[in-house]
Amino acid sequence: MPFSIKKREKTKLRDRFPVLWQVLGDLLANETCYCASDYNSFTFKARRSRKSRTIDAPCPHLKALQRQALNILLAPVVVHEAAMAFAPGKSIAMNARCHLGATHLYSTDIRSFFTSVSRVHVKEMLATRVKYLSVEAREEILDLVTWNERLPQGAPTSPHIANLVMFSFDELCTDMATRVGATYTRYADDISISSTSADVLLQMQKVVNMGLGALGMEPHPEKTRHLGPNQTKLVTGLDIGGSHIRPTRAFRKKTTALVRMSVKYPAEMEKHQEVIFGYLAFWYDVDPGDPQLANLLWQMGQPREASRAKATRQKQIGMMSKPSPTTPPPKEQQAVPLNAERKPSKPPVTKPDV
């Protein structure tokens, strides 16, 4: 993996960030940074893609200061409700549930999301969303969280700041989606919009392109999709086509095969136990009432979790069998004697053509 290190002399964080140090200095163990560079950049290739990705990892001292600035100064600034990533209580499952049962889905991806967030974006965001801090403090935060005039992918502050920068975009898409009867969510760089009309989604696509263009960003054309009623619709990797969200069929088949192999060859599969339990835990978080999941948990020697999964399934069945509050209960029919005379039914009334 190629590394890129920019050498510099030893510096003190107290001297570089004097205003922030007055607030956060007591929470840090060391004020002197002995690292040769603020960031170490390395490139790797994803498993399922040939494209490479660059990670800019901050040095331990700078990372510690960034984390304290995030927890104390930046985290209280709330992100938009449509932002489903990097926020407390949000998850891919919650993101998918927003689109459950949709007949039409438009999804796209923001190209080079973190590197597209520039220093100018962050400066404008701090001036509008973090007004309670002084100008000097905002300038130091700007220097702390950006690198090479952009948001580094690898700093602990980058995900939350990216969400804050996208607040106006989220607000624009949410307002327009509400007007046209659609649902909009964004999980990091993944945008999902669902509706009952394909024309509505084409209209929303124009809004997305306009909003991203205003920020100097662009959607990824290879990851832009319009899906209709007879197509499998996935939101953040979860199937939203049924009555409840589920992991994909490929994920369920892979997990089932791993469990079967673990039961048949326990010694050989011992080293894969953590991976298997991780898959089962993810499945349980997404769809705890799946009967297939309960069976797999029993096979893996987890009777308590399997019983919980079965109980959840029974609860789901009970909720589905309950009549709707707006539907009146059926009237009790009185028994009619067999020899009783039946009144002839009235013929339907037809209106004459005018």
Image (cartoon, rainbow, N blue to C red):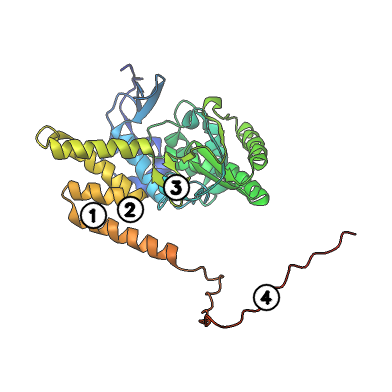
Give the residue pinned by disc 4: 344
Q: Earlier in the sequence, mark 3 or mark 2?
A: 3
Spatial distance from mark 1 to mark 3, Cα to Cα?
41 Å
Residue visible at 67% across and 51% down in the picture: 179
Give the residue pinned by disc 2: 288
Q: Earlier in the sequence, mark 1 or mark 3?
A: 3
* Amino acid on which disc 2 is placed: Pro
Q: Secondary structure at mark 4?
A: loop
280 to the left or right of 172? left
Locate the N terminus and report the quarter of the image it occupies.
Answer: top left
Spatial distance from mark 1 to mark 4, Cα to Cα?
57 Å
Residue visible at 44% across and 40% down in the picture: 236
* Amino acid on which disc 1 is placed: Ala
Q: Secondary structure at mark 3?
A: helix
Q: Evaluate if marks 4 and 2 touch, with contact meaning CB atoms under 8 Å apart.
A: no
Q: Disc 1 vs disc 3: which is toward the camera?
A: 1
Quarter where residue 49 is shown: top left
Quarter where residue 213 is shown: top right
- For the residue carrying disc 3, how many other residues have a C-alpha within 10 Å: few (<14), some (14-19), or many (20+)? some
Residue furthest to the right in view is 354
Disc number placed over residue 74 in the picture, else none: 3
- For the residue carrying disc 1, how many other residues have a C-alpha within 10 Å: few (<14), some (14-19), or many (20+)? many
Give the residue pinned by disc 1: 306
* Amino acid on which disc 4 is placed: Pro
- For the residue carrying disc 4, how many other residues have a C-alpha within 10 Å: few (<14), some (14-19), or many (20+)? few
Residue 344 percent coordinates (x, y): 67, 75
